[in-house]
Image: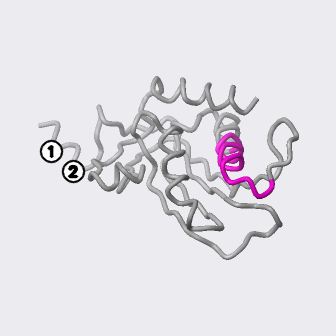
Amino acid sequence: MIRHTLLAVALVLPLAASAAEYMEKTPFQLSRAFSPGVITQGGKTVWVAGQTATVDNEGKNIANNFEAQVKQVVSQVDQVMKRAGGSMANIVSMTVFIKESRYGDRFVEMRKDFFQNGNYPGSALITVTNFARPGIEIEIQAVGVIGDSCSTENPCSAEGMAKKK
């Protein structure tokens, strides 16, 4: 089920219209899969509560399994966005909490798969001491904007408008 959900997300993202204007990224920002800023104007804002998981969509125990939890938590964020009329392609900001800093690079590599179009959200990756429940390795809180008037084709930033001239 997770594979089907992730595959569906991966197939939809490159086809989705830009949900906002994603500022130009430096090589470092590209390597870490985040945007320095995302500009929105209008649209419907969705504040996605922090998502965690110790059980996947199929009921399998994924406690203490970082990669499985990343996939499940991203699936949950996507499900919230879909309920609001959007998808992961509409995420403009993510705050990611991980229990162990050694998972930071792996998370970044996985995040690249979730945003294959290169429109990475503005993001923070924070290491924490622990979570509210045993077995949790990651929590993701996100903000999405659906139906925004800003995009690469219709820039709202001074940077984007200058490039368009």
Specify whether 152 is left or right of 94. left
* Identity of the residue drawn at 27% across and 51% down: 27
Residue 158's label in the rendered image is 2
Compared across the picture, whether 151 is left or right of 96 comes to: left
Residue 100 or residue 124, whichever sits in front: 100
- Residue at image x 55%, y 29%? 10
Q: Is residue 57 magenta?
A: no
- Specify the quadrant that holds the N terminus: top right
* Rendered view: 86 above or below 157: above
Q: Position of residue 134 (x, y in %)?
A: 83, 66
Q: Residues within 10 Å of mark 1 (few under 14, many from 20)?
A: few
Q: Residue at x 66, y 48 (%)?
A: 67
Residue under label 1, please give it: 162
Q: Residue 118 falls in which quadrant of the image?
A: top left
Span colored in magenta: 63-76
Which secondary structure type mostly characterizes the magenta part of the structure?
A: helix
Tell me which amino acid carries mark 1. Answer: Ala
Q: Residue furthest left?
A: 165
Residue farthest to the front? 102
Q: Are marks 2 and 1 in contact (CB under 8 Å)?
A: yes
Q: On the picture, is 66 further left or further right than 39?
A: right
Amino acid type shown at disc 2: Ala
Q: Name the residue nearer the viewer: 71 or 121.
A: 71
The C terminus appears in which quarter of the rendering?
top left
Question: Looking at the image, which is closer to me, 123 or 83?
Answer: 123
| Residue 94 % position (x, y) | 54, 55
- Give 134 or 47, whichever is nearer the viewer: 134
The CA span between labels 2 and 1 is 6 Å
Which residue corresponds to the image point at 74% horizontal and 55% vertical from the top-left? Answer: 52
Instruction: State the count of labels.
Output: 2
- Residue 146 lies, in percent from the top left, at 53, 38
